[in-house]
Image (spheres, rainbow, N blue to C red):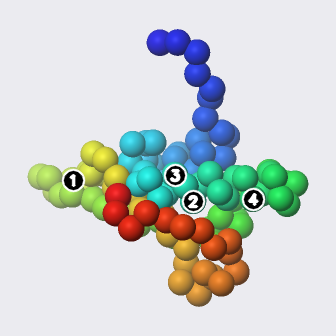
Amino acid sequence: MGIRHPPHKFLRGLLHYYKVELQHLTPNGVQHIAVFVALCEGFLGISPHFDMWLYFFAVNLLKKREKRQELSVPVGCASIHLCNNRVNKYLSMHLSTSN
C-alpha cells in the first residue's frame, strides 16, 4: 500500500452526494473541485461550502442501462461544469478541451 494523504473532506462529501467514485470524475471535474477548495480555503478563508458549490456547478452523470438497471459508466461518467448563467461570477480558468 504505502503512505498516502486522505482525500479532502469536501471531495469525499461530493463523491458521496453524487454517488460516484474518484475514477468517475473527468480531469476537468477534478480541476473544478481543486480550484473551488483552493478558492474557499485560500482566498475566502472559509471551509468549502456545499450550498455555494451547488450555486456555481452542475454535475451530469452518464448512465448506461443494463437489464432494467442504470449503472454508472466505468470511467469519466461525472461531468462537472459551471452553470451557464453563473460563468461570469466565477474564476476564469483554462480547461482541457479533450478528456
Pointers 1 and 3 in contact (C-beta within 8 Å): no
| Sequence-first tag of 1 and 3 | 3
Camera-side mark, 1 or 4: 4
Residue 45, percent across and down?
Answer: 87, 54
Q: CA distance from mark 1 to mark 3?
A: 27 Å
Label 4: which secondary element: helix
Between 32 and 77, the one nearer to me in the picture: 32
| Earlier-in-chain disc, 1 versus 4 | 4
Question: Which residue position is annotated with label 3?
Answer: 30
Q: CA distance from mark 2 to mark 1?
A: 30 Å
Residue 39: give its label: 4
Residue shown at 65% from the left, 57% from the top: 35
Q: Which residue is mark 1?
A: 69
Q: Amino acid at mark 2?
A: His
Pointers 3 and 2 in contact (CB under 8 A)? yes
- Disc 2 marks which residue? 32
Where does residue 71 sit, x and y in percent of width and height?
Answer: 26, 51
Q: What residue is shown at x 25% (from left), y 55% (from top)?
A: 70
